[in-house]
Every structure is written in C-alpha cells, then in structure tokens.
Image: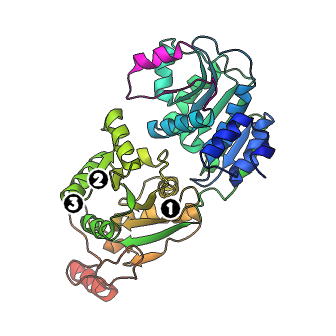
Amino acid sequence: MTFETLGLPARILKNLAEMGISDPSPIQAKAIPLAMEGRDVMGLAQTGTGKTAAFGLPIVSKLLRLEGRPDPKSVRGLVLAPTRELAGQIRDNLRAYAEGTSLRINLVVGGAGINGQINRLQRGTDVLVATPGRLIDLLDRRAVRLDKAKFLVLDEADQMLDLGFIHALRRIAPLLPKERQTMLFSATMPKQMAELSEAYLTDAVRVETAPPGKPADKIEQFLHFVVQSEKAGLLKEHLAEHRSDQALVFSRTKHGAEKLMKGLVAAGFEAASIHGNKSQGQRDRAIKAFRAGELMVLVATDVAARGIDIPEVRYVYNFDLPNVPDNYVHRIGRTARAGRDGTAIAYCAPDEMGELKAIQKVMKRDIPVASGRPWDPVDAPKKGRPGGGRRRGGPGGGGGQAKKQGGAPKSGQRRRNRRSKAA
C-alpha cells in the first residue's frame, strides 16, 4: 500500500514526498482508509509510528474538498492534546501536510498570550489544535465556536480520558455537533479508559498495530538497581560514554528535574530542563535548542513524555521511575522514532520496586538487568535514612557486585541483622 492508493490529494502527496515520507506506516495503512470513509476510529500503536499522520492526513484531505471558508470564530476540526509540547508538534505536522493550501491551522495552549490567540481565531479556523484548559478559557470568553466542527480527535486518548481531563472533556464535547467524525489515538489504552471512550465514539473501528503497552521493537532496554543518592553519579558516567548522542532524561518532580539539570551543567554537560515551573517561552527555547543539536541533554518531567518528536534522540533515561506505569512506555518512545534504533535505561531505587513491577506488568516483559539485583523489602531504606548501593555498569554493561560499604547486605547478613534487632 502507498499513499497514492489511499486517495490523498495530489498537493498532500507532493508535501509528503518533500518531507521524505514515502510509504505509510502500519497504523497509517490501517487507519487512513477507515478515516477517509468517515468512520470513527480508535487507533492503538507504539510511540513514534506516525499516529499524527494517521488522523491528520484524512482530516486535511477532507477539509480540502469542502467549499468556502470557515465562519468567523468557528472551527471545522478540533484536535485535543494533553500537553503544550504535543499540541505544538501536532500543529507543526498538520501545517506541513497542508503546505501550499489555504487551510488555516491554529494552536491554542496555556502559557502563551491569550489575546493573540483570540485575534487569530476571529477569522475562523480549519483545524484547531488545543489543550483543554486554554480551550475552555477561550470558550468562556466566547472567542471560539465549536458548533460547526466536523472532526474531533483526542490524541494520547488514555491521558485525555484520565480524571485530570475528563471534566474538561465533559464541558467541551456537548458543544460539538453530534454528527461528527471522532478519532482517538494512543500507545496505551487501559481497560477503564477504553470503556469511557465509548461515550465519545459511534460505531467505531478499533485498529491496532501492536498490543497496547508494547514499546517499539527497536528500543533496547536496560535496568540498573541503584540507590537514589548514587543515581546522579551513574547518570553522569553513562552520559559521558556517549557525549555525541542526544539524551532525554526523565525526573519525577519539577524540583528534581531542575536540580539534576544544574548538576549536569556543573559537570560540563550541555543541558537544559523543561517542566511545569518553566514558562512556555522557556520550554519552547529549550526544545528548539535540543532539536537543533545545540543541547545534548534535556531533563524533563512527564510533560515531555508525549510530544517530543526528535528522531536524533538516541538515549532515554528514566532517572526516576514513573508513578503511572503507562508513562514508561511513552517516555521510552521518545527514542527509536521513524524507524531508528534507540536505547532506554532505567534506574530503580529500593523504594521504586512497586513502580518497576507495575511497568513490567503493563509491558508483559521484564527489563533486562545491566547491574545490581532486585531489591528485597528489607533493602528499602527507612524514611530519612540513606540506603545501600550497587557497583555500577555501563548502559549495556554486565551485572555489577554490591559495594562493600553501603551495599545491600547479603541474605545471611540480613538474617543476623534481624536477630540482633530482635535481641
């Protein structure tokens, strides 16, 4: 199957060729024909496999066949995304598909001036890409109308249907016509989310190119068991081994991401951070510099787990394991994009064994251990006390041995310790 056989307009085919996109990916080959027929679609595919084009190309193609221009303040197609970065990436892709046409594709996200967004919406919009919070702000100001929308897309639908966004969706969805085409796309779809999504789809077709939660096959994964206090040193060792390759590092908290980034800069690495305490301008500049290769390391919270599409990212580090296991799949999906290879490295501290087990359950596979050994419950340090350590290996190194000092005690030593405590 080729893009020509999918019935796309000649202008779009030309744009795809200029972008170096020659053949549809599996999710595109399955979803585009159904979307072109007007069917509601639930698409499940691994990260980095072209889900944006799977819904974007049909929408742009069908809009080009409509006559006239959108009415003032009206929207013909609405794409909702959970993060500003992802929304911006979708807008950029849609504009590239529609290059040379008269389609207006606008972006509205928080953290940017609302007055400029209001002015752009005044002329009418063919496709509006939005985060839910900012869209509601604009609806409250009567700056945009959704009653003419013919298309609704929820990208990263599992997070969009999460409790954090469901209240916003319940405000937005009734403002769209009932007669519309709706598409949901994600790499993961927990059972309860799939059930909830039925409220937004009509006679939908579910298309999958891999079991939900399965990471891309070209991602090589490694796991290191290491105490929290030694993670920063291990990260610096690993980054030093591939200074010419770009790396994305995930931290669980905003404070942790900022502290880690400053430590890396002090150690001589070209690094920046993006998280919720950064302004949109700061986040945009960091991503732009990372995309241009001016930065080799980007430290981020899960704000970047969905939306950073930079094919040159060779390594992804889970400095902290995510509380939500599905987010691990999205995080490591920032590498091995567009058919490339990639490496994902995770660090597991004693108090993260629960997160690790949940992640491996979602993926239905164990992450290969590069150093250390699984922590036992007695290994977990009490709050306020440092834990033991592990000798560390490289990103693909062999298993290390426990350190003499500060290392996790062997089983016999643990039994003696328990007996002495009981005495």
Quadrant in the rendering for residue 78 = top right
- First reached walking from the N terminus: tag 3 or tag 1: 3
Point out residue 94 in the picture as x, y percentages from the top left corner. 59, 35
Q: Residues within 10 Å of mark 1 (few under 14, many from 20)?
A: many
Is residue 416 shown above or below 84? Answer: below
Gap between marks 1 and 2, in whole Å? Answer: 28 Å
- First reached walking from the N terminus: tag 1 or tag 2: 2
Mark yes or no: residue 301 visible: no
Q: What range is drawn magenta here?
A: 99-123
**Which residue occupies the foreground of this view, 48 or 213?**
48
Q: Residues within 10 Å of mark 3 (few under 14, many from 20)?
A: few
Residue depth check, mark 1 versus mark 2: number of the one nearer the observer: 2
Give amino acid for label 2.
Ala
Per the image, label 2 sits on a secondary structure element best described as: strand
Question: Residue drawn 38% across and 22% down?
Answer: 113
How is the protein colored in the picture?
Answer: rainbow
Q: Residues within 10 Å of mark 2 (few under 14, many from 20)?
A: many
Give amino acid for label 1.
Ile
Question: Which residue is tagged 2?
Answer: 271
Which label was assigned to residue 359? 1
Q: Is residue 100 magenta?
A: yes
Q: Are marks 3 and 1 in contact (CB under 8 Å)?
A: no
Point out residue 217 in the picture as x, y percentages from the top left corner. 59, 65
